[in-house]
Image: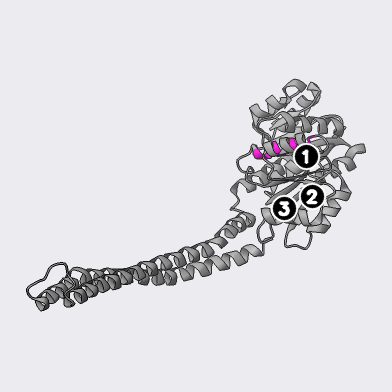
């Protein structure tokens, strides 16, 4: 774990308290090495031992801006506070900026409170590491499987059409060949051949035999060879029917798990407007008022779609977008940027960073819903 502070003596005090319970406790007190210390130690628990919440917020913001590993390193952040800042610490933890707070300044008789918070944080991380795939992850895969039935049906129908086409072609070839030989026989009977032959009847028999042996039999054999393919198509459809039932059942279960949309906007009124447009549409809505809060939510709950304002306090939306796209586990999440400014430079930066779309405020209801449907088919 890592104890961060701007005062060496405070960091040493907290480290000494934690050393009795935990094996490896490091400190970070140089403001120029904040990100480097985190990246080098990759802590499971980060303790912010500053003498004010404001300093802790600034430190946390700097980490999210400059650290190369904070977005991929599972960890919990515990902030220490004084009694006059308890409400603010509570609010920031509720908003997801920090994970927990401990009333620490000045130290009270409840000194074990901090080690207990660390134990709980480590226990939670261990549970997350050992967890099975989430229902949301299963649902996402099931939605993809839902297209399998339609795809297989289309391919089978196309295959049957090809087989029928081959059968028709074979029958047509047989008919054409027979007609050609019949015409030849008629010309022979009418003495219309360029040269006379000695025995017309004998020649007719020879041609008939030639037709039967050289054309009818092979074409009949070829026609018969097509029949197993047709039977195979029917058998394949029957064999896959139970699997398709499983796919339909799995998709029905997936339908009970609503896709998650994360709305990121520092304007409470805008969040309310977007929420009113999207609510009740078989979607689960999450909201964040800042870039750090959004990253915290994304780290814990992988949303299916993010609607993110460009202008955010602390870390702007484009920077948050770059951070998300830099993490392989999160890179596939579609992110639609929203802004009241439609300058070309902002649009280009957003698209270059990996945005899947762009909406200009005030948001038009139909345009917003169209973007959401495009990113979440069937929602």
Q: Position of residue 297 (x, y in %)?
A: 73, 46
Where are the magenta residues, as a range? 315-325
Which residue matches tag 3? Answer: 371
Q: How crowded is mark 2: few (under 14 residues within 10 Å), some or many (20 or more)?
A: many
Which residue matches tag 1? Answer: 291
In the image, residue 255 above or below residue 300: below
At mark 1, the secondary structure is helix
- Tell me which corner region of the image, top left, top right, bottom left or bottom right, holds residue 322: top right
- The residues bearing labels 3 and 2 have C-alpha atoms spaced at a distance of 18 Å
Image quarter in which the N terminus is found: top right
Counting residues from the start of the chain, the first of labels 3 and 2 encountered is 2
Frontmost residue, 302 versus 309: 309
Q: How crowded is mark 1: few (under 14 residues within 10 Å), some or many (20 or more)?
A: many
Image quarter in which the C terminus is found: bottom right
Q: Where is residue 236 in the image (x, y as percent from the top left)?
A: 41, 68
- The residues bearing labels 2 and 1 have C-alpha atoms spaced at a distance of 11 Å
- Tell me which corner region of the image, top left, top right, bottom left or bottom right, holds residue 42: top right
Q: Position of residue 305 (x, y in %)?
A: 70, 50
At mark 2, the secondary structure is strand
Residues at circles 2 and 1 in contact by the CB criterion of under 8 Å: no
- Nearer to us: label 3 or label 2: 3
Q: Residues within 10 Å of mark 3 (few under 14, many from 20)?
A: some
Q: Residue sitting at 65 percent across and 39 percent down?
A: 325
In the image, residue 45 above or below residue 4: below
- Tell me which corner region of the image, top left, top right, bottom left or bottom right, holds residue 209: bottom left
Image disc number at residue 200: none
Frontmost residue, 93 versus 348: 348
Frontmost residue, 7 versus 119: 7
User: Most prominent secondary structure in the magenta stretch?
Assistant: helix
In the image, residue 222 above or below residue 26: below
Which residue matches tag 2? Answer: 287
Q: Where is residue 203 in the image (x, y as percent from the top left)?
A: 11, 74
């Amino acid at each position: 774990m890592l104890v961060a502070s701007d005062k060496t003596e405070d960091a040493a005090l907290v480290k000494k308290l934690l050393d009795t319970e935990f094996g490896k406790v490091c400190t970070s007190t140089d403001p120029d090495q904040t990100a480097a210390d985190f990246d080098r130690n990759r802590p499971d628990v980060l303790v912010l031992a500053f003498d004010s919440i404001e300093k802790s917020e600034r430190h946390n913001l700097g980490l999210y801006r400059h650290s190369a590993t904070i977005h991929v390193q599972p960890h919990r952040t515990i902030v220490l506070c004084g009694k006059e800042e308890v409400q603010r610490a509570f609010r920031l933890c509720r908003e997801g900026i920090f994970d927990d707070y401990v009333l620490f300044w000045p130290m009270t008789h409840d000194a074990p409170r901090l080690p207990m918070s660390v134990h709980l944080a480590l226990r939670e991380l261990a549970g997350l590491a050992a967890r099975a795939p989430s229902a949301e992850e299963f649902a996402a895969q099931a939605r993809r499987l839902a297209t399998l039935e339609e795809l297989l049906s289309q391919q089978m129908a196309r295959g049957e059409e090809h087989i029928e086409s081959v059968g028709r072609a074979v029958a047509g070839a047989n008919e054409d060949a027979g007609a050609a030989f019949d015409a030849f026989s008629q010309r022979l009977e009418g003495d219309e051949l360029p040269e006379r032959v000695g025995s017309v009847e004998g020649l007719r028999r020879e041609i008939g035999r030639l037709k039967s042996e050289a054309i009818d039999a092979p074409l009949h054999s070829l026609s018969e060879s097509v029949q197993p393919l047709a039977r195979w198509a029917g058998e394949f459809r029957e064999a896959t029917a139970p699997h398709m039932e499983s796919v339909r059942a799995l998709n029905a279960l997936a339908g009970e798990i609503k896709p998650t949309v994360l709305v990121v906007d520092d304007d409470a009124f805008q969040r309310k407007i977007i929420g009113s447009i999207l609510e009740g549409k078989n979607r689960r809505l999450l909201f964040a008022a800042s870039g750090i809060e959004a990253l915290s939510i994304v780290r814990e709950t992988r949303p299916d779609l993010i609607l993110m304002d460009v202008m955010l306090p602390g870390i702007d939306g484009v920077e948050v977008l770059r951070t998300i796209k830099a993490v392989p586990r999160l890179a596939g999440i579609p992110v639609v940027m929203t802004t009241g400014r439609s300058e070309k430079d902002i649009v280009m930066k957003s698209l270059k960073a990996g945005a899947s779309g762009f909406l200009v405020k005030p948001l038009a209801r139909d345009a917003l819903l169209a973007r959401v449907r495009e990113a979440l088919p069937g929602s």
